[in-house]
Image (tube, helix red, strand yellow):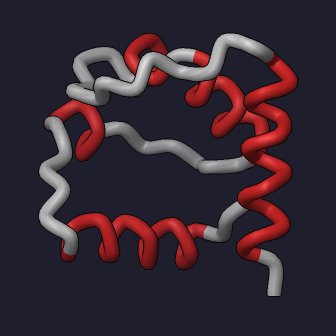
Amino acid sequence: MWSRSEWIVWKAVWYNFGYSYSAANKNMVVNWEEKTLYDYLQNPKKYIPGTKMVFPGLKKPQDRADLISYLKQSTAS
């Protein structure tokens, strides 16, 4: 889905906006591909235990697939 360099860029953008990551997020090493993003979007707190993320996730498989499709389309070059 995203290359490591793309993920690093997005992470830098979030840091610049003042988002404060929890230790769990900072220490989690994830190769962000469609499968890992799909699993994360289902239940962020289960995927990264200890995260302070308040987003409960997307329970419907089609909602997760639609979001990933949107992200792919909107970031395609």
Residue positioned 51% across, 43% down in the render? 30
With respect to residue 20, does 12 lie above or below? Answer: below
- How far across and down, in percent of the image, does residue 20 sit? 13, 50
The quadrant of the rendering that contains the C terminus is bottom right
Residue positioned 40% across, 26% down in the render? 55
- How far across and down, in percent of the image, does residue 33 sit? 71, 48
Give the camera-side residue of 25 and 74.
74
Left or right, 57 with reference to 59: left
Give the camera-side residue of 37 and 61.
61
- Count of numbered circles in the view: 0
Which residue extends farthest bottom? 77
With respect to residue 33, does 54 lie above or below? Answer: above
The quadrant of the rendering that contains the N terminus is bottom right
Identify the image quadrant of residue 4: bottom right
With respect to residue 63, does 37 lie above or below? Answer: below
Left or right, 74 with reference to 21: right
Left or right, 68 with reference to 26: right
Left or right, 2 with reference to 8: right
Identify the image quadrant of residue 65: top right
With respect to residue 63, does 75 lie above or below? Answer: below
Residue positioned 20% across, 75% down in the render? 16
- How far across and down, in percent of the image, does residue 32 sit? 62, 49
- How far across and down, in percent of the image, does residue 31 sit? 59, 48
